[in-house]
Amino acid sequence: MSIDFNLVFEIVIYLSILGLLIYIVITYRNTLIAENKAYLINKELKIKLKLAKNKSELLNQKNILVEEINETVFLNFFEIIKQLLLLQKTILEEH
């Protein structure tokens, strides 16, 4: 039984080509899966970014409102103290 060297060589080449084709298909499939995962992560991150921007804007508006309220309360606080001191002065002068 003599095996022809060319036949063995052709079988090795065909198996190598088949192996490479299988490797290419698996790599392509993995690439598509990775691309799909990256797309979903990108989409999720865009939604999170939008929510974070909305939250940031809301917090900025609240901060502005608190600053305005603080200024108003601060000014009214001194006015109330002034009125109380005048009332105390008036009460002390009457006695």
Image (cartoon, helix red, strand yellow):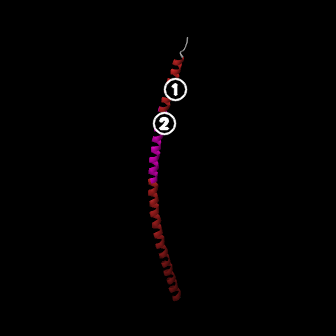
Does residue 15 sit above or below 44 in this rendering? above
Q: Nearer the viewer, residue 87 or 21?
A: 21
**Looking at the image, is mark 1 or mark 2 nearer the viewer?**
1
Q: Residue 79: which disc?
A: none
Q: Secondary structure at mark 1?
A: helix
Residue drawn at x 53%, y 23% is 12
Farthest residue, direction bottom: 94
> Dividing the image into 4 quarters, which one contains the N terminus?
top right
Magenta region, main secondary structure: helix
Does residue 21 sit above or below 59 in this rendering? above
Does residue 47 sit above or below 66 in this rendering? above
Amino acid on which the number 2 mark rests in the picture: Asn
Q: Secondary structure at mark 2?
A: helix
Tell me which label, 1 or 2, sits earlier in the chain: 1
Q: Residue 16: which disc?
A: 1
Residue 77, x across and y down, in percent: 49, 75
Using the numbered discs, state the Cα–Cα distance from disc 1 to disc 2 in whole angstroms. Answer: 21 Å
Residue drawn at x 52%, y 26% is 16
Farthest residue, direction front: 6
The answer to if 8 sits in the magenta stretch is no
Q: Nearer the viewer, residue 79 or 13?
A: 13
Q: Answer with the quarter of the image where residue 58 lies.
A: bottom left
Residue 26, x across and y down, in percent: 48, 33
Q: Which residues are magenta?
A: 25-49
Q: Nearer the viewer, residue 91 or 13?
A: 13
